[in-house]
Image (cartoon, helix red, strand yellow):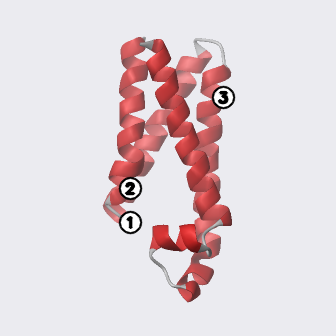
Amino acid sequence: METTANVLVGLVAALHVYILVLEMFLWERGPGRKLSGFDATLARATAPLAANQGLYNGFLAAGLIWSLIADDPTGFRVQVFFLVCVVIAGLYGGFTANRRILLAQATPGALALAAVLLAR
């Protein structure tokens, strides 16, 4: 079960690295505009906001990666903390910005958190 939990944590970390790249570097290009649904003008106007969000997603990814390489009990505690942050961010984004965020961010975070807690 611990291996499954670690794989899920790794996948959530990879997802947040992907979101970082989309929001920080591809926001005004095809992938970022497809994600946001914005035209070129609105994408350009919102690029600094998206980059800020991307940076926060990068911090989540960094924390999850740290949790995978840290020895216990630190690794476990860091996993729980950052996965809870992912779930809260996903819930907030899902209810305030776009419902898709519930499925794309909150659900994987919650599944990984459940696996980490069950593996303990």
Counting other residues with Cα less than 10 Å from the Cα at mark 1, is it few (<14), some (14-19), or many (20 or more)? few
**Residue for point 31% across, 60% down:** 99
Q: Quadrant of residue 43?
A: bottom right
Horizontal relation, residue 68 to residue 104: left or right: right
Q: Which residue occupies 57% across, 85% down?
A: 40
Distance from the alpha carbon under mark 3 to that under mark 2:
24 Å
Q: Position of residue 63 (x, y in %)?
A: 62, 35
Q: Which residue is mark 1?
A: 97
Which numbered tag is attached to residue 66?
3
- Against 57, is 30 above or below? below
Residue denoted by label 2: 101
Locate residue 93: give its quadrant. Answer: bottom left
Does the image show residue 8? yes
Q: Amino acid at mark 2?
A: Ile
Ranked by sequence position, the earlier of labels 3 and 2 is 3
Dot 3 amino acid type = Trp
Q: Please state which of the two labelled residues, at mark 2 or mark 1, is closer to the viewer.
A: 2
